[in-house]
Image (cartoon, helix red, strand yellow):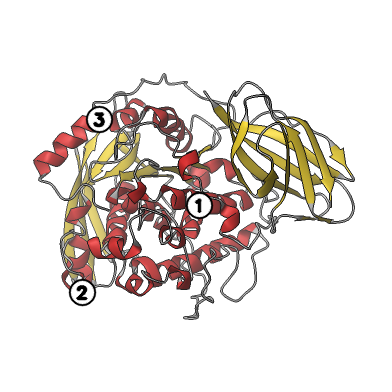
Amino acid sequence: MRFHRHRSPVWAAAAFAAVACLGAATLSPQAGAVGNPVAASQVASAEEDDGTDCPEPGPGTLPASPLLPDPFMKMDGTRISDTSEWRCRRAEIKKLAERHVYGEKPGKPDTVTGTVSTSRISVSVTDGGRSAGFSASVDLPSGPGPFPAVVVLGGFGADTSTIKASGAAVISYDPFEVGREGTPRNNKQGAFYSIYGSSSDTGLLMAWAWGVSRIIDVLEQADGSILRAEATGVTGCSRYGKGAFVSGAFDQRIALTMPIESGSAGAPVFRGVAGENGAQPLSSAYGEQPWLGDAFGSFTSNPAALPVDTHEIVGMVAPRGLFLMENPHVDWLGARSGSVAALGGAEVYKALGAGDNISYWSDIQDGTHCAARSEWRTPLQQHIRKYLLETGDDPGVFRISSSKSGNLAQWRDWRTPALTDTEGDTGGNTGGGTGGDTGGSDDGCTASYRNNNSWSGGFQGEVSVRNNGTRALNGWTVGMTLAPGQSFSNVWDGQNTGSSGSITVRNASWNGTVSPGATVSFGFVVTGSSSAEPGNLTCTTS
């Protein structure tokens, strides 16, 4: 990324204040409250990494492929079939990402101590006989505490005035204290490298994520009278968006992750960035700063050889809250590849029955990099209510800009499994949205529609196809009619014929086989009036 190079602390503070001053509507205490909120404790873990007891994957690599790796395929070549298996599959993905992309995130240090006040957090770490420390500032909202908190990397992230108005504190964390930019790979500097060595092959993004984890350690040790450790979010924009993305993926205590415009080395899939016109090349992202681990250097010209990609890093966040925000107006940011990562990672959320817990938004008007945007204000409030304040249950939304809309179907040859859940409810819930479930059936096949999100000039819909028969379906086709002036602008998990008027959508290669009683789905974005829903739904089998 060629944005937000290191500035003086005075400049950073001024910029932070400028972003904060853009403002947001103040929420009433009961705004958005519903009868069945999702508590942060229901999605976040009590552990930084709950897969430490899983078997260590061997050194083998998957065959090189231009398509995205199957997130449900274990290293032994078998696919997971139960939600309980995801824990150790996630641990495999984590290890592959450390080995090939980011470098290792060390386990919890020997000792972590510190203090929490109404204005500051201090952190002191000792591991392997070496010590280092850093600090972060605290900005509390009005009202009585204790408060949830959002760690804002580098002063650039989600609008801080909206965060505070929503009832959450802001922890301003300077990641350069932990991993400094402008240093060569063989002489990295900062608190992380003071402990683990200046020649460590771990990149800055993972070092920054390590720093966020140590802040949470200190919050957990405090008496909880000021900040609630179990309700912590993280955000950042541009290079700090990269850091926020990695932080949320590699610490399961983080209840809400909100990367913004993270670009190459952030959320966008590596395989897509390599071919996306105008996106920052992987070699540039690797060479600009030591953000990525040293091992990634061998993949900059051959991302197809990577045994992991960022859609799986998105999946590592599941089922915790994730709100990805991107800017389609700056080609350098690779927003098309970002949408592919979000769509691919959303399949993990759906398989785990947590489809409502991921949101993606690139449909914005202002193309200024890292601006505070009005389009993101309401969903930001909703996410804070749901995951940090535990007073809301708004479903996740996908608002993908038509100018940078990726097609997941072009990037995968795997299908999303209908996972069983031997420890709870049946998996496979596609999640997301509310609305009517009306439709027609033919030959044991039923199509039902629901509206996931609406806005002025369009809406996002989802159609579920259910096999009501006693034999497996080997293909299906859904028919529907759009109102005059409406047209499809994006379709995923299905192949459409026509984009306005009478439309048919047939299955993709991976979701045509539907077991008796099972359900698959496809999604789409419609431009035009949002007042009329698709009509005349029919479902036929091949």
450 sits to left or right of 447: left
Q: CA distance from mark 3 to mark 2?
A: 37 Å
> Counting other residues with Cα less than 10 Å from the Cα at mark 1, is it few (<14), some (14-19), or many (20 or more)?
many
Q: What SS does tag 3 mark?
A: helix
Instruction: State the residue position of label 3.
Output: 20
Mark 2 lies on residue: 199
Q: Is residue 440 left or right of residue 221?
A: right
Horizontally, is 84 left or right of 127 in the view? right
Query: Is residue 31 positioned above or below 274 on the image?
Result: above
Q: Is residue 341 above or below residue 456?
A: below
Can residue 348 be seen at all in this image of the molecule? no
Instruction: Kindly state the secondary structure of the residue where label 1 is placed.
Output: helix
* Mark before the other along the chain sequence, 1 or 2: 2
Could you tell me if the residues under marks 3 and 2 are in contact, i.e. CB atoms within 8 Å?
A: no
Q: Nearer the viewer, residue 514 or 222?
A: 514
How far, Cα to Cα, is label 1 from label 2? 34 Å
- Real-space CA distance between mark 3 and mark 1, rounded to the nearest whole angstrom: 30 Å
Give amino acid for label 3.
Answer: Ala
Which of the two residues, 161 or 2, is positioned nearer the viewer here? Answer: 2
Numbered mark located on residue 340 in the image: 1
Residue 427 appears in view? yes
In the structure shown, which secondary structural element does the residue marked by tag 2 occupy?
loop
